[in-house]
Amino acid sequence: MKTIYDIQQLLKKFGTFIYIGDRLADLELMEEEIKELHQAQCMSNEDYQMAILLLRSEAARERDRLKGRE
């Protein structure tokens, strides 16, 4: 798992499609879904850790981008 797209494809395999229209909210919701899949033991620890890392770094980038607009 290397990109947010990879995470979206993983979620899609479990029937989860996330699109709210707000990029930051989408990323936060994806993180919650990934946590639930991990707790249900539907994904490996390695995939879980990589997905969380990617989502949090992308969310931080999005927050910085939004701050730059203000």
Image (spheres, grey):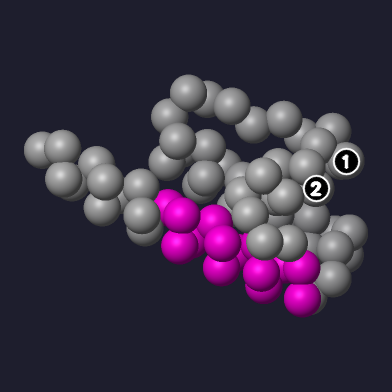
Instruction: Please tell me in which quadrant of the rendered image residue 22 appears.
Output: top left
Is residue 35 in view? no
Residue 55 position within the rendered picture, expressed as x and y whole percent measured from the top left: 54, 56
Q: Amino acid at mark 1?
A: Lys
The magenta stretch spans residue 47: yes
Which dot marks residue 13? 1
Q: Which residue is mark 2?
A: 10
Q: Is residue 44 above or below residue 25?
A: below
**Residue 12, percent from left and from top:** 81, 37
Q: Amino acid at mark 2?
A: Leu
Asked whether the beta carbons under mark 1 and mark 2 sit within 8 Å of each other, the answer is yes
Q: Residue at x 42, y 41 (%)?
A: 24
Q: Which mark is residue 68?
A: none
The answer to whether residue 22 is left or right of residue 11 is left
Mark 2 Cα-neighbour bin, 10 Å: few <14, some 14–19, many ≥20: some
> Dividing the picture into quarters, in which one does residue 38 lie?
bottom right
> Which residue occupies 73% across, 62% down?
1
Residue extending farthest to the top is 21
Q: Position of residue 36 (x, y in %)?
A: 73, 54
Q: Position of residue 5 (x, y in %)?
A: 67, 44
Left or right placement of residue 32 versus residue 23 in this view: right
What range of the chain is rendered magenta? 46-59
Q: CA distance from mark 1 to mark 2?
A: 5 Å
- Image point 67% across, 72% down: which residue? 49
Residue farthest front in this picture? 2
